[in-house]
Image (spheres, rainbow, N blue to C red):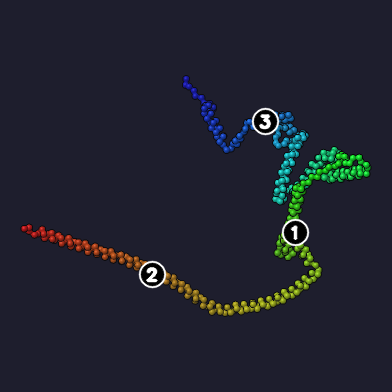
Amino acid sequence: NDLGSFRTGSLPWPYLRTIQSESTEEELTSTSVEHIIVNPNAAYDKFKDKRVGTKGLDFSDRIGKTKRTGYESGEYEMLGEGLGVKETPQQKYQRLLHEVQELTAEVEKIKTTVKESATEEKLTPVVLAKQLAALKQQLVASHLEKLLGPDAAVNLTDPDGALAKRLLLQLEAAKSSRGAGSGGKSTSGSPPESSLVTYELHSRPEQDKFSQAAKVAELEKRLTELEATVRCDQDAQNPLSAGLQGACLMDTVELLQAKVGALDLAVLDQVEARLQSVLGKVNEIAKHKASVEDADTQSKVHQLYETMQRWSPIATSLPELVQRLVTIKQLHEQAMQFGQLLTHLDTAQQMMACSLKDNAALLTQVQTTMRENLSTIEGNFASIDERMKKLGKPQG
């Protein structure tokens, strides 16, 4: 029997271990993974002796109208709506403390940027100051029982007025008790401590300054809007709107008052008389201008007639002049062509002269060379003759 081979989807353990190590290294070096360093000792100290309360919690996925309750976390615990669960005093205190902190931060931010935010935010500083005053009144009302006792009757809508009334009543009571004590015979020299009334006045000038600045900013904003509404665009065609682009509303009102004052009946009569005199002068100027314009027109027509009279003989000789100009143009063109031919011949003549000079120089050089060669040949023949003569003589 032959041995069979089988394949399995699982990889060998060494190869699988190599792949896992490579994927782990890639994950550790990837920039898409956020690496968080956790201190186990600090985490243990933070969650030591802590328990997770599961009372009243429901993580089921059942279908129902009631809302499921899970774990919630945050700076303070916010109860959901519709649960029917009442806040504990601690939860309410944490929530109010957090909201007051947020409100304080927003007020500080508005103090620094009151002019910039006046045109952007709907909640103006004046409205915010009013809301803070109302919140202050409510807070003062919550401490009235501690300050004045449980029998203090305070109107929550006006706690400051209620405090003032309470103060006046106690002052009247103190005056009456002092008058009764001085009328009768008292054995002790000093009044008892129970009859004394002590009041502490707390003033916040910073808040008053802020409220005043907010009111001034609101008034400036409303005044700017009013000026933008009243101010009209400059119209050159309308004389009544001339000069109404004042720097502020008061300047515009003063200009309007001056224009309205000029419409008085006495002033209108004087203006009408002046306009009648001006109208008569304008009519005289128009008549004089018409006569002057007529004289100018006649002179221009006369000049034009004289020009046409001078132009008549020129117009008759104009065709002949044009024909002569055409002929002269043709002559100029032929002369230009003849000049070009002369220029070409001159250039060719100069080239031939240069060639003749070069040939003469070469001929002179050849003649010199031939003379030298001829003298050399004559010398050679003379030497040959001498040698032949020497060879022809008999030797003695």
Q: Earlier in the sequence, mark 1 or mark 3?
A: 3
Density class for disc 2 (Cα within 10 Å; few <14, some 14-19, many ≥20) is few
Residues tagged 1 and 2 counted as in contact (Cβ below 8 A): no
Residues 60 and 315: in front is 60
Placement of 146 over or under 327, stated as above or below: above
Q: Disc 2 marks which residue?
A: 342
How far apart in space, not on screen, are marks 2 and 3 (Cα)?
Answer: 117 Å
Q: Disc 1 marks which residue?
A: 249
Density class for disc 1 (Cα within 10 Å; few <14, some 14-19, many ≥20) is some
Picture residue at 73% right of the left edge, 29% below the top: 55
Q: In what element is the residue under mark 2?
A: helix
Of tags 1 and 3, the one toward the viewer is 3
Residues 24 and 337: in front is 24
Residue 394 visible, this angle: yes
Residue ranking furthest to the left: 396
Query: Label 3 amino acid?
Result: Phe
Residues tagged 1 and 3 counted as in contact (Cβ below 8 A): no
Q: Earlier in the sequence, mark 2 or mark 3?
A: 3
Query: Label 2 amino acid?
Result: Leu
Q: Disc 3 marks which residue?
A: 47
How far apart in space, not on screen, are marks 1 and 2 (Cα)?
Answer: 92 Å
> Residue 290, how many percent across, how many down?
68, 76
> Residue 373, how many percent across, how many down?
21, 62
Q: Quadrant of the C terminus?
A: bottom left
**Count of numbered badges drawn on the protein:** 3
Q: Earlier in the sequence, mark 1 or mark 2?
A: 1
